[in-house]
Image (spheres, rainbow, N blue to C red):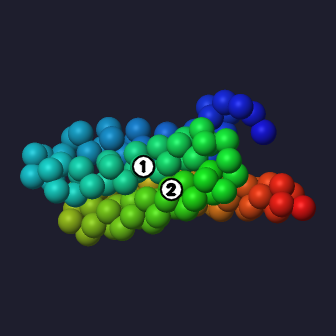
């Protein structure tokens, strides 16, 4: 594994997702930004932020815990996306695009968590 967070695919995907969310929310009216928008942006930003924080800990158990926090933010983001769609803040096309991206991140994050878990097991042998 690389020593650079920027080389971690799941981190890069999380950053791309968060930026897409940011630029979509910027187009909303004040009330929508202040309610759903802030929550969605914060949860989307938190996905990559927690991956990065765990990566920087250099201890597999701590890294894994932060990945669990990241996964929680990911699921929270799905909830806010659904609210944005049901409140007509995003189109079906944008919703489906973002949902596809978040589902891919979820898959990659689970794979990364499993990888970290294998490292923990090897270190305890």
95 or 106: which is nearer to us?
106
Circle 2 crowding by C-alpha within 10 Å: few under 14, some 14–19, many from 20 = many
Q: Position of residue 122 (x, y in %)?
A: 86, 57
Q: Is residue 110 visible?
A: yes
Residue, x 47% and y 64% (percent of image)? 72
| Residue 105 found in image quarter | bottom right
Above/below status of 45 relative to 89:
above
Q: Position of residue 35 (x, y in %)?
A: 16, 56
Above/below status of 21 relative to 36:
above
Kindly state the secondary structure of the residue where label 2 is placed: helix
Residue, x 27% and y 61% (percent of image)? 84
Asked whether the residues under the numbered discs 1 and 2 touch, taking CB atoms below 8 Å apart as contact, a structural biologist would say yes
Residue lying farthest left? Answer: 31
Residue, x 66% and y 30% (percent of image)? 4
Circle 1 crowding by C-alpha within 10 Å: few under 14, some 14–19, many from 20 = many
Separation (CA) of disc 1 from disc 2: 7 Å
Q: Position of residue 115 (x, y in %)?
A: 76, 56
Q: Which of the image's four quarters has the N terminus?
A: top right
Q: Position of residue 5 (x, y in %)?
A: 62, 34
Q: Earlier in the sequence, mark 1 or mark 2?
A: 1
Q: With 25 as the anchor, is 15 left or right in this view?
A: right
**Which residue is under mark 2?**
70
| Residue 64 found in image quarter | bottom right
**Which residue is under mark 1?**
46
């Amino acid at each position: 594994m690389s020593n650079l967070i920027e080389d971690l695919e799941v981190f890069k995907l999380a950053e791309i997702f968060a930026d897409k969310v940011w630029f979509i929310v910027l187009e909303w009216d004040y009330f929508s930004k202040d309610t759903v928008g802030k929550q969605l942006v914060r949860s989307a930003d938190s996905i990559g932020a927690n991956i990065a924080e765990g990566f920087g800990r250099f201890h597999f158990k701590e890294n894994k815990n932060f990945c669990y926090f990241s996964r929680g933010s990911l699921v929270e983001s799905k909830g806010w996306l659904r609210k944005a769609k049901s409140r007509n803040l995003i189109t079906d096309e944008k919703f489906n695009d973002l949902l596809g991206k978040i589902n891919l991140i979820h898959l990659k994050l689970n794979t990364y968590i499993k990888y970290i878990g294998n490292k923990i097991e090897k270190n305890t042998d």
